[in-house]
Amino acid sequence: MSRKPHEPDEKTRKTVEAMSSYGIPQEDIAKVLEIDPKTLRKYYEYELDTAAAKTNSQVAQRLYQKCLAGDTASMIFWLKTRARWAETVKQEHLGKDGEALKYPPINLVIDGIATPQKAVQGSTEPGE
């Protein structure tokens, strides 16, 4: 027994557009409508292609309105994502009394490894 051909109507078009705008995979949308994914793409190509852009536009509009209304979190988000603003942190590591850190000299040994005590004392020979 074969199924009758799928006939899109306004209700199914709105369902597809809504589900697609929410990011629901096409395979899942097809399951909800009880149709094959190929049938979904055949009859609802426009809804599938435009739903995300329409929703992103609506969300962007609301974010923009919140920014203009003075919502600080929205303004910070907008500036970081749209205006390439970034928070920067400058870290300085200082020694005693704010002086630059002093590190003992590091001596490289080609044929062996100097112990840290020997390296600090200036030895370049392993085991000295």
Image (spheres, rainbow, N blue to C red):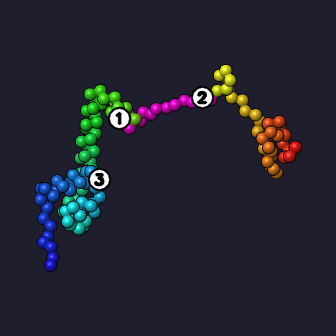
Q: Residue at x 28, y 34 (%)?
A: 64
7 to 110, vertically: above or below = below
Query: From the viewer's perspective, is 99 left or right of 6?
Result: right
Which residue is label 2 attached to? Answer: 92
Numbered disc 1: secondary structure:
helix
Q: Residue at x 25, y 38 (%)?
A: 61
Work out whether residue 91 or residue 85 is closer to the camera in this orientation and state it.
91
Q: Residue at x 18, y 55 (%)?
A: 15
Toward which corner of the image does residue 91 lie, by quadrant?
top right
User: Is disc 3 in contact with disc 2, using a CB cutoff of under 8 Å?
Assistant: no
User: Is disc 1 in contact with disc 2, using a CB cutoff of under 8 Å?
Assistant: no
Which residue is label 1 attached to? Answer: 78
Query: From the viewer's perspective, is 110 left or right of 81?
Result: right
* Residue 62 visible in the picture: yes
The kind of residue on which mark 1 rests is: Trp
Which residue is label 3 attached to? Answer: 23
Residue 102, image x, y percentages? 72, 29
Q: In the picture, which quadrant includes the C terminus?
A: top right
Q: From which residue to which does the magenta span run?
A: 81-93
Residue farthest top in this picture: 97
Residue 3, image x, y percentages? 15, 73
Of marks 1 and 3, the one in the foreground: 3
Residue 17, image x, y percentages? 21, 53
